[in-house]
Amino acid sequence: MNDPAIFDAETFEHTLTSAPNPLSVFRHALQAGQKVLQSRFENGSDAEPLVYARAWLIDQLLTRVFTRFVTSPHCALIAVGGYGRGELHPHSDIDISVLVPERVDETLRRSLELFVTFLWDIGLQIGHSVRNVAECMQEARADVTTATNLMESRLLCGPHALYDQMLASVGPDEVWPSKDFFAAKLAEQIARHHKFNDTSYNLEPNIKEGPGGLRDIQMIGWVAKRHFGAGTLHALVAHGFLSEAEYTALNDGQKFLWNVRFGLHSLAGRREDRLSFDHQRTLAKHFGYNEEGSRLAVEAFMKRYYRTVMELNRLNEMLLQLFDEAILGDIAAAPIAVNKRFQTRNGFIEVVHEGIFKRYPFALLEIFLLLAQHREIKGVRAQTIRLIRSHRNLIDDKFRNDLRSRSLFMELVRQPHGLTHELRRMNRYGVLAEYLPVFGRIVGQMQHDLFHHYTVDEHTLFVVRNMRRMTVPEFAHELPMCSELIQRIPKPEVLYLAGIFHDIAKGRGGDHSELGGDEARTFAHAHGLSEYDTRLLVWLVKHHLLMSSTAQRKDISDAKVVNDFATVTGNQTTLDYLYLLTVADIRATNPTLWNSWKDSLLWELYLATSRAFRRGLDNVLDQKDIVRETRTEALHLLQNLGVQQHNIEQVWSNYGDDYFQRYSADRVAWHTQAILQHRDRATPLVLVQSQGQDGRGGTAVFIHMQDRDFLFATITQALDQLGLNIVDARIIATHDRYTLDTYTVLEETGAPINNPARLREIVETVTRALLKPGALTPAAKRQVPRQLKQFTIPTQINFSDDPTQARTVMEVVTTDRPGLLAQISQALIKCNVRLKNAKIATLGERVEDIFYITDDQNLPLNNPDRQQQLATAIRSSIAP
């Protein structure tokens, strides 16, 4: 290579000769060359030529610096690692090694120190080592990474003989024979993939180290070089280990990832391999992606990214399996027949001859069914993976309409074992997207937010995995009720199909639940499901969000809310299916979304709905009946504890019916006993009840004291400064103006609080805040997380009526931030609005909080002017 625009050797040498300070000449040459490379990238050049050009630029400078300081004819300068491959991104590591003779005198040692110092002074951040040949061999034998770096080295300057001697000393005949090298590198890759949860589909993926990333391509090259002596990936084509089409796919994938990595380094101004949210948006714009309807440009860019790494992951799996068979496998092992189309060899399934898929296209599905049925089979042989990939074009409408194909797919869905593994394998091999084109549309489809951690296809397969996990006895302790329920549903396959189809229409615009239900109906009719099963499947897909939205956004202590939900659900069987689908869906959305509070909310709604079905939907419990039942049961509990009835009745005489409607009997008994034991009514009573004591998933903080202004603001601020998340608030005042308020809280991690010291801290902090409200600092000090800063949700405030409870429902949708509830409470106070209840829902960066409010006379806030005044006050209070 020779590019004078990047580095003009003649001009450089002339300037160097006349310059009083050579340091500035080298520094200027480095900066000028890198500026040219950056300008070319910004003007639309692909990264590939720039990556090689930067390595060439560094070569020119390093060799000149080396020969300037090191005059010994017995030393060699070599590039190792990525630089050894001649690949350097803007801020890639520049790794070099100096080969020295066995004895290094003081003169050589000093010259090497000056050489390294000069490199740092001109602005090169290098990683370096100084070793003789024996030390190279010793280090390589001890560490496979060192052996790998030296294996892909380049001689920059110095004696070839010395370099060749080093290469021979670290070659497979001396250290790390092919089998050992492959086994070590494979274990290294498995461990690396585990760090990223074995998925390419992370919100902010690592484009180098993650599954399907650049390191996976390098892995193939390392093994090829070690075993075959192949200098390039293309050399594997001649060895028969790679087809031209596969080589092109690998090369195209690498080019795309290089473009992304070059852009990342340029944006960050440092080495950066994590594709963070802010960089995703900027790169999408740089690469020319545009908005398309409801789809953001960044979502189109990331869909291309995810599909690229998925294809690279597929190729990596296939080629490593091929290497495993060639390097570690017993090639002479006799095949064992499975049926007339398939056999196993060394525990891996393969076709009996290469024409199987062409002659029997349905075998493209049959192989996955066999893998599910024969749990002893370890996997698929590489050549058969290649044949599956190359015959996917046979999966056309004729194939999909073939009764054999439909029967095979449904038989797979009905298998007691292996469904999740085989659906994932079908997705990796590209078969699932071909058989279900509607699934193909969601492959790599992401939503640019903090709520959905996975692409739609990955989330869908996680949902099915969660369902299957409920059937496995060793995981029954995770979700005991789900594990019990799933044994009772008549046809689990309908549940699994609902999991596959619930988000199948994401990204199309419109209501994905309705569109998905239509797709599910088409599938069900084509695959011979009964009319009953079809109706159930379609209903589940169309209503898959119903239970979570009801539990998290409505007051499920209200009998009418429960009855309305039961009316839509229809019967106990449908409720069982919906509950299982809802739990599996929430747990598959992101790793932190599921917590004990959501668990308890859903279970509480499930139990209340089951009771409604047993009672009959026409026999809705009257509110007075609920009050009477709660009072009777609570009275019985208290009397069993030795509390006198006249004392109980004295306390309850100040309570309104809404208290007994919204609290369970055991909660009423807990409150009453504590209030009777609390002698000083002038001081606040603060109680905590840890998770498990009342069957609810959060930690309850109960406050009984004389009501006053700013109380909600004081309490929410105190809880916020403890680092607690409030997920529910029940605000009730007695006739004699005392509070009966309960706040359900979780730690920031989503965990309930069970530690006695932490519980005491909550009681002490809240009590202190209530006694001396001015002692709290005026604002929360928790830092806004980095990811949260990248998203801004326009604030929306909506009002609606809740006529059965004579109150107004206010929904606030905005960006999450520390101290939000305390800020909203200030607006409520300012507008003289009373809070009766609150449902707090945080969905990634998005807050969707529901507040049940009245005016200062406990009447609904129906006046539009007052609603507008409150909305304006909230916007002002929460403004950044």
Image (cartoon, helix red, strand yellow):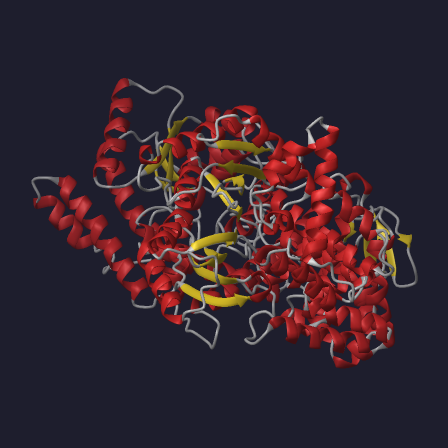
Q: Is residue 72 above or below residue 841?
A: above
**Residue nearest the observer in this picture, 583 or 276:** 583
Horizontal and vertical percent position of residue 195: 56, 41
Residue at 42 percent across and 33 percent down: it is 162
Residue 403 visible from this viewpoint: yes
Where's residue 412, x and y in %?
A: 83, 61
Which residue is drawn at the image coordinates 41% and 51% (left, top)? 788
Quadrant position of residue 555: bottom right
Q: Pick the quarter of the image with the C terminus.
A: bottom left
Residue closest to the eye, 78 or 197: 197
Q: Position of residue 273 (x, y in %)?
A: 43, 49
Q: Is residue 183 visible?
A: no
Q: Residue at x 10, y 39 (%)?
A: 21
Tally the marks: 0
Q: On the picture, is 811 further left or further right than 474?
A: left
Give left or right: position of 775 versus 232: left
Q: Residue at x 73, y 34 (%)?
A: 637
- Residue found at the very far bottom of the displayed protein: 398
Measuring from the top left, give residue 184's x and y in whole percent.
62, 36
Of the 4 image quadrants, the one containing the N terminus is bottom left
Q: 513 or 52, which is in the foreground?
A: 513
